[in-house]
Image: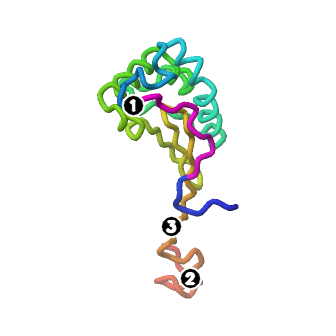
Amino acid sequence: SVPQDGCWYSVQPPAFAPDDPFDGPSGWPNLASGSRHWKASMTETATMFSNLVRAFGVEPHCTICSAGSTASAFDAHTTSPQHFRVVSETVEAQFEMAREELWHETIVVGGRVRYNHLDGEMQVLREVPEEQEYSDTVALQALPYDGVWL
């Protein structure tokens, strides 16, 4: 089926689900065992997202870390111990609501792609181009001064 304009579609389902969403970082299997396990767990999904948006000519930068990922590539940054700490702190503070706070959205040609920093889900949204308020073609006679360029 063809995706409907204006609707989010999951192209990569969540790689992880919480064992207990009210248990903070301990409730998430990708967070519970520390930053090394985090890196091993999230590398594949972060790389998939990065490769998809790079195919559109976009280099994403982390929007949830105060330092961002300007010093390194998105996929390297989002599997780093520093990023792990930010995600863990967000889950500790937000519990079951953290997932909604951890979406990273990137605008691409024809729509948007978003990645969830907590569970690795990737979604796409196709947007309808806005209609232009003017005509692309103008007859020479329709110019304000016939035969004169402005």
Q: Quick one: SS at disc 1?
A: loop
Q: Is residue 25 above or below residue 138?
A: above
Q: Is residue 55 above or below residue 73?
A: below
Residue 100 horizontal/vertical position (percent): 40, 41
User: Which residue is located at x 46 percent, y 25 percent?
Assistant: 28
Residue 46 horizontal/vertical position (percent): 58, 29
Which residue ends up furthest to the right in the rendered image?
1
The amino acid type, in three-letter code, at marker 1 is: Ile
Q: Which region shows up in magenta?
A: 9-21
Sooner in the amino-acid sequence: mark 3 or mark 1: 1
User: Which residue is located at x 54 percent, y 31 percent?
Assistant: 16
Sooner in the amino-acid sequence: mark 1 or mark 2: 1
| Picture disc at residue 64 | 1
Q: Main secondary structure of the magenta part?
A: loop
Q: Which residue is mark 2?
A: 147
User: Which residue is located at x 48 percent, y 42 percent?
Assistant: 105
Q: Quick one: SS at disc 3?
A: loop
Give how far apart the Cα atoms at labels 1 and 2 are: 55 Å
